[in-house]
Amino acid sequence: MSFIVNNWYWSISGNASQVWSSAANGLVSVTDATYEAWLASGNNPTPIGSVVKAMAVVIEQKGLLDDSDVTMHRIAEAVALSLNSWTGSDVVAFVDYRRALRAIVSGSDTTSTSIPARPSYPTGT
């Protein structure tokens, strides 16, 4: 089977009992029925050094940072046109999301086990 970013597994160094699943956005047991079916289809998990590195692959492959860059540009336009402010809770939530993605990709976040959920577009964007 070819690599499908939304349905892939990574074996994490030093963790023989779990794999990281992009479909589940988290660690799953190696005895998980969905994982076992995926293996039975002829797939093999990709070895990787950490959960954060697996999440970074997914973030990059899905273009989540590129999408967040476009949204940040839209936010900046909305603020410039006084349609929103940088202190709006929806804007702050989106900025926090983008920072979390960047921390995962840069490796400065070493503890997360799932990719944060993308918040809604901020008002006025």
Image: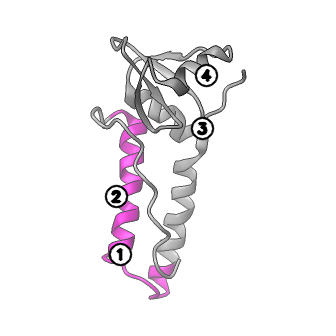
Q: Is residue 101 above or below residue 105?
A: below
Kindly report the distance in space between the C-alpha atoms of the residues bearing marks 3 and 4: 13 Å
Q: Position of residue 94 (x, y in %)?
A: 41, 63
Amino acid type, mark 1 = Trp
The residue range painted magenta reads 78-107
Q: Amino acid at mark 4?
A: Trp
The reply to whether dot 3 and dot 4 touch (C-beta < 8 Å) is no
- Of mark 3 and mark 4, the one earlier in the sequence is 3
Q: Position of residue 33 (x, y in %)?
A: 51, 24
Who comes first in sequence, dot 1 or dot 3? 3
Placement of 76 over or under 25, stated as above or below: below
Q: Which mark is residue 96?
A: 2
Q: CA distance from mark 1 to mark 4?
A: 44 Å
Amino acid of disc 2: Asp
The residue that label 1 is drawn on is 86
Q: Residue furthest bottom?
A: 82
Q: Residue at x 44, y 80 (%)?
A: 79
> Height in image: 45 above or below 34?
above
Q: Nearer the viewer, residue 23 or 59?
A: 23
Label 2 Cα neighbours within 10 Å, binned few <14 / some 14-19 / many ≥20: some
Q: Residue at x 44, y 63 (%)?
A: 119
Q: Secondary structure at mark 3?
A: loop
Are the two marked residues, 1 and 4, in contact with CB atoms closer than 8 angstroms? no
Q: Which residue is mark 3?
A: 6
Element carrying mark 2: helix
Tags 2 and 3 touching, CB below 8 Å: no
Mark 2 vs mark 4: in front:
4
Q: Residue under label 4, please give it.
A: 38
Callout 4 crowding tier (Cα within 10 Å): few <14, some 14–19, many ≥20: some
Please state which of the two labelled residues, at mark 2 or mark 3, is closer to the viewer: 3
Asked if the stretch drawn in magenta spans residue 56, the answer is no
